Image (spheres, helix red, strand yellow):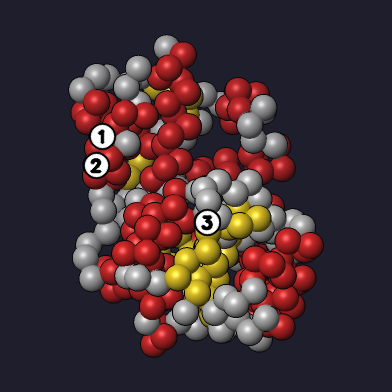
Amino acid sequence: MTVLVTGSRGAVARTLVGLLRQRGLAVRPASSRPDGPDAVHCDLTDPSTFAAALKGVTSVFLYAEPSRIGAFAEEAVGGGVEHVVLLSSSSVLAPDAGKSPLASSHLDVEKALEASGLHTTSLRPGSFASNALAWSWSLRSGRPISLPFPGSHSDPIHEADVAEAALAVLTDPGLGGRPYTLTGPESLTFAEQIGILGRVIDRPIPFRQVTRGEWKQETAEHIPSAYADPLLDWWQSNDGTPVELTQAVPELTGHPARTFTTWAEDHAADFRV
């Protein structure tokens, strides 16, 4: 068994590579900007990089890049890939997923893999706990965090739990071939997450409520409007409303999902100025 792990510079993939190696499995880290002596070049937007990356591979951990997914799937089928584990998103479950740039990028990949006939397992996390890293910019600049919906709920999941879920479905054939919606163990508002971070780093973290327009203006350099509006709509829909949690992480990993407090403790250095 040889596993191609795409997006190997990302937090989930880096953790997964380590877990697979601990199991003694052959791993091929891949990235559009490979780093490390054993990493290979695989740019999911460039089909010319697919054949070499997939040569001899039996399983793939795949990030959801839709632009050339048809070519990737064709190369994977031709190369004898037996299983693809896709890092998708729970946003694909929304009734209007096809109309949202955020959701459709994942949905298009899921549909392409299904059409290809590849044996596929879709992991659908809700909100990554690591999204909170964006707040560290405000802390370093001495400004309060701007929140358009401080009372909006999410289900922050630790990247290690996603990686362990991927390990489970890659190494146990009986678990594959169906989607899993992954959540953290708690539905927390943004204000509650900031409070937890403040307690972990032992300093108050100020935030201020802003309008949608103010937030879009502040983040325009990092988040295009086409993505900002669906994100704001999603936050608004969860404002004051806890999100539904699943038991997929404990079912796949054998332990409770890590709390946001655990994630904050693991990443405390990122928030200390």
Label 1 residue SS: helix
| 1 or 3: tag closer to the N-terminus | 3
The answer to whether one can see residue 271 in this image is yes
Q: Amino acid at mark 1?
A: Ile
Q: Which residue is mark 2?
A: 261
Distance between the alpha carbons at the discs numbered 1 and 2:
6 Å
Dot 3 corresponds to which residue? 38
Q: Tell me residue 273's x, y (percent).
A: 35, 17
Regarding mark 2 in the picture, which secondary structure is present there? helix
Residue 187's label in the rendered image is: none
Q: Disc 1 vs disc 3: Cβ atoms closer than 8 Å?
A: no
Total marks drawn?
3
In contact (CB < 8 Å): disc 1 and disc 2 = yes
* Residue 67 relative to residue 53: left or right: right
Q: Identify the secondary structure beneath mark 3.
A: loop
Residue at far top of view: 142
